[in-house]
Image: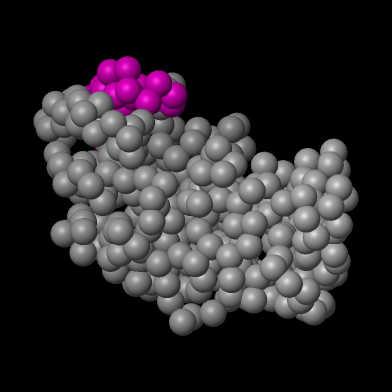
Amino acid sequence: MHRSELTVDLGALRRNVRTLLRVLDGSELWAVVKADGYGHGAVDAAGAALGSGASALCVATVPEGLALRLEFPDTRILVMSPAGSSRELAQAREASLELALSSGEIPDGIRVHLKLDTGMGRYGLSELPAPPVEVVGLMTHLATADCDVDFARAQLEQFRAATDAYSHLTRHAANSAAALRLPDSRFDAARCGIALYGLSPFGTDPAEDGLEQVLTWSSQISQCKLIRPGQSTGYGRRWVAEQETWIGIVPVGYADGFRRDLTGTEVRVAGEPRRVVGTVSMDSFAVELDRELPEGTPVVLLGHGVSAEAHARVAGTINYELVTGVRSDPRRARRTVVDG
């Protein structure tokens, strides 16, 4: 038996795509599948997104783009981070990848999107030159669409003013948060990642925006034991029983992506919410129970009422980091793809 199981529901991803397309109201949806599809599997996520109406794929690196090109020979694929070398430029040219360009000369024979820095303060041109023929798109990156709409609107106005003279080119600025909440951000296309996977860019309940969580992560109780008053579980004795308490040991830990700072979060054991207690170890963690339960009792770590957003609040991070950190190493976890 595997220590845990990851289930990716492509049916939920397809429904999220259709939800986003309705919101975009005519703008194209470009599916962001970098970081192995935010931990969901890039090829599976890309295929489902394209089959449901997405027009293009976005990745972070040339190697990510090359891997997808093998599976999707005719799909538009945009690499959003700079190419790392002349070899990568040659590979991108050969594979007909499109590149986001933030500095330097425009390479021959490659379709390019000029990236204007309007406030993110990372990659991007400070001023937009007159685009030569190789340029097919103009883009920017919003820094605060999830938390400060006034700053996001200022970025959008700067982008619009700089690009209105070149509106014949494809313009794109919106991420998931902007696509959902800022109609002025949508331009010709929106680059949506986190929302595809049914996760909220705002750290709230994804259902508020009509999104369905795509990933379910489950395990089981591998041992149940009674801890007596004054006894503890886990490194550092961070949890000490005040009364007789049953705990269940789950064979998943931070080596699997269940982070050490998730102590105190809730998972579901036999369908009931139960608190994680003690220190999360490399290969296991403990849950507080109200009774003795048999080995093999199911435990849900994500999905079915256990949200990445709730875990993120406990860990002091964001849902993006949690799901990209879940490891699908077949030596430790079984990965299943369904189309529900």
Q: Residue at x 21, y 64 (%)?
A: 22
Q: Residue at x 21, y 29 (%)?
A: 150
Q: Which contiguous range is marked in magenta?
A: 116-137
**Residue 193, percent across and down?**
42, 52
Magenta-colored stretch includes residue 142: no
Image quadrant of residue 175? Answer: top left
Image quadrant of residue 134? Answer: top left
Q: Which sits in the foreground, 177 or 27?
A: 177
In the displayed structure, does residue 160 sit left or right of residue 29?
left
In the displayed structure, does residue 121 sit left or right of residue 23?
right
Q: Residue at x 77, y 50 (%)?
A: 242
Image quadrant of residue 114? Answer: top left
Quarter of the picture holding the N terminus: bottom right
Q: Residue at x 24, y 34 (%)?
A: 149
**Residue 319, percent across and down?**
51, 48
Q: Which sits in the foreground, 113 or 299?
A: 299
Q: Is residue 16 above or below residue 316?
A: below
Whether residue 288 appears in this view of the structure is yes
Magenta-colored stretch includes residue 121: yes
**Residue 197, percent across and down?**
45, 60
Whether residue 66 appears in this view of the structure is no
**Residue 327, percent across and down?**
69, 56
